[in-house]
Image (tube, rainbow, N blue to C red):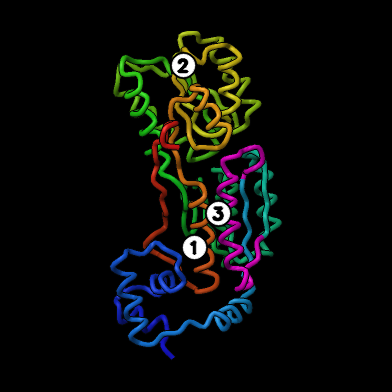
Amino acid sequence: MVTIKQIADLCGVSRGTVDRVINERGNVKPETKELVLSMAKELGYKPNPAGKALSARKKNPVVGVVISSEGNPFFDDVIRGIKLAAEKYEIYGLKVIWKNMRGYDVKSQHEIMEELKDKVNALIINPVNDPVIIDEINEFVDAGIFVVTINNDVDNSKRQCYVGSDYTNGGETAGALLQMIIPNGANIGIVMGSSKVLGHKQRLAGFEENINKNPKFKIVDIQENDDDDISSYDKTKMMLTKHKEINAIFIVAAGVYGACRAVLSLGKQNDLTIIAFDTVPTTVEMMKKNVIKAVIYQHPYRQGQRAMQIVFEYLVNGIISHDKSRHIMKNEIKILENL
């Protein structure tokens, strides 16, 4: 019987590449895909899904998913990507334990992780960047649990890989975009999610670095909303009332709808240029009302799908890409006309 390993050796590629080609899971160059398929056909390779599924079930693959999705519509598409991928792998006995949470409370996330530790073989987590959570991630890895951080990473953990956007680049892109829209300068108010989230800090740093190069642009105030629309409404309204000179707003993460509602309540929608992230329905609504000028899209569905795919390849096929610990989704500028 011809094996995936034999095909990989003959083609000079990894087993994971051959597996992705044969199981049509993408992320393979067209020329490599053609080579693998040609070699498989020449050797008479025939996949045995029933046998593979039976073997996989014996491993009892269970994945824990911990995401701060409550009250944050961005994660709807992330979860949809994870769920659809997981459904595809159910034939292999893959089970998922879902644990959603609101905001970025360290104690709550730590308790959830403790609860999952003895129940899962792998963990997909949107982590709080805190030493308590980093230590817990390291304990998971030391216990043989495969850990993927999704949409946000943490500082210096043992996690096997990260799936998400390049946050620093996202901030730099937002800064450059704002200067293109209003080249004559701006007084900027920033509404960020949480300083407990590494990605939010990186995005803010990228924005500040870009903006600070231009003396026509000044950052007037920064408020945190914990990715919550109610808090975002209150903080934005307070900021705009206190700093009437603000004529541009950069919304770093979630809470976009709350911030925009505050702008509308003050009747300042025609006086402000707003840059935000992602294309959740309420953000699109605000783009249609011309409250938001542009957003930066970070492919949430693909993030979820890719994270579960990586976990599946490890749990069922024993494949891990040691040379690719970061799977980055490209930041993409969206305006109303190209949504």
Quarter in which the C terminus is drawn:
top left
Marked residue nearer the N-terminal end (3 or 2): 3
The front one of 88 and 110 is 88
Visible residue check, residue 331 = yes
Marked residue nearer the N-terminal end (1 or 3): 3
Q: Do tag 1 and tag 2 residues touch (Cβ < 8 Å)? A: no
Residue at horizontal 45 percent and vertical 68 percent from the top? 24
Give the main secondary structure of the magenta stretch: helix
Type of residue at label 1? Ile
For disc 1, the neighbor class at 10 Å (few under 14, some 14 to 19, many from 20) is some
Quarter in which the N terminus is drawn:
bottom left
The front one of 128 and 293 is 293
In this rendering, is residue 158 above or below 216? Answer: below
Residue 310 is marked as 1
Disc 3 element? helix
Visible residue check, residue 154 = no
Residue 293 is marked as none
Q: Is residue 116 shown in magenta?
A: no
Q: Which quadrant of the figure has residue 105? A: top right
All told, the count of numbered labels is 3
The front one of 104 and 90 is 90
For disc 3, the neighbor class at 10 Å (few under 14, some 14 to 19, many from 20) is many
Residue 272 is marked as 2
Residue lying furthest bottom = 1
Q: Tell me the magenta residue range.
A: 68-96
Disc 3 target residue: 81
Type of residue at label 3? Gly
Disc 2 element? loop
Residue at horizontal 30 percent and vertical 78 percent from the top? 11
